[in-house]
Amino acid sequence: MNPLQALAAVAAPFGIAISSAAPIEIGAALPAVTAKDQDAQEVKLAETAVKGWTLVYFYPKADTPGCTKQACSLRDSYATLTEKKVQVFGVSLDDPAAQKAFQEKYKLPFTLLADKGGKVADAFGVPHSMGFAKRQAFLFKDGTLVWRDLSASTDQQAADVLKEIGK
């Protein structure tokens, strides 16, 4: 039993859910999950991201310092990312209203997915508990996972992705 599984077992009697699934492996297909975006519109991730590059990054909570640095890193490099044909999806366990407020406050030009129930995080194997997902990033090429960062950077997220695409 790994430490996260042990913590999940201890927390369960108190009604606290802790996800302990293993992260998806390189070569895996983009999970076929659906979530609402910041405008409460359904996004079918696997259908939206079948061609080209797709970055799905998870962050703990909208409008918190580290999450803002991570999102703004991607915002500030968005022109370069789009030149390279990269679609960007940010995911947290916030609701659509919180995602919308975060997007508007920082002028984020990409889609933010509201994963209130944690089903998107679970599909990717991203640990989460008490409403917070672990910061991780997954890069797909034509719907297949080619790179993952299981302890994703905050202010270097865009640089890390662009470096990987340039290989």
Image (tube, rainbow, N blue to C red):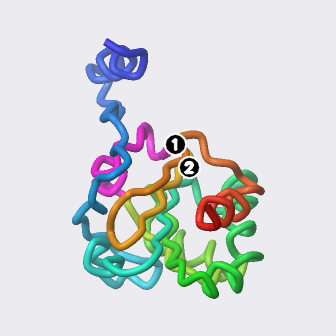
Image location (x, y in percent) of residue 41: 34, 84
Is residue 142 visible in this depiction of the protein?
Answer: yes
Q: Is 122 included in the stretch rendered in magenta?
A: yes
For the image, the number of numbered tags is 2
Residue 17 seen from this side: no
**Helix or strand or loop: what does disc 1 sit on?**
loop
Which label number is shown at residue 60? 2
- Find residue 101 and report its horizontal and vertical position in percent: 60, 76
Marks 1 and 2, how far apart at CA: 6 Å
Residue 145 lies, in percent from the top left, at 38, 57
Tell me the quarter of the image containing the N terminus.
top left
**Image side of residue 70 versus residue 32, left or right:** right
Label 1 CA crowd tier, 10 Å (few <14, some 14–19, many 20+): some
Numbered tag placed on residue 165 in the rendering? none
Taking the spot 30% from the left edge, 35% from the top edge, the residue there is: 21
Instruction: Please tell me in which quadrant of the rendered image residue 158 appears.
Output: bottom right
Q: Does the residue at mark 1 contact the one at mark 2 (Cβ under 8 Å)? A: yes
Residue located 73% across and 62% down the image: 159
Q: Which residue is mark 1?
A: 134
Query: Which badge, 1 or 2, is on the more N-terminal residue?
Result: 2
Q: Quadrant of the C terminus?
A: bottom right
Looking at the rendering, the stretch of residues picked out in magenta corresponds to 116-133
Q: Is residue 8 above or below residue 54?
A: above
Q: Tell me if mark 2 has few (under 14), some (14-19) or many (20+) residues whose alpha carbon lies within 10 angstroms of its own.
A: many
Amino acid type, residue under disc 2 in the picture: Pro
Q: Who's the residue at 34% across and 23% down the image?
A: 8
Q: Nearer the viewer, residue 144 or 71?
A: 144
**Secondary structure of the residue carrying numbered label 2:** loop
Image height check: is 150 above or below 108? above
Where residue 97 appears, as percent x and y from the top left, is: 49, 74
Residue situated in front as seen by the camera: 20 or 88: 88
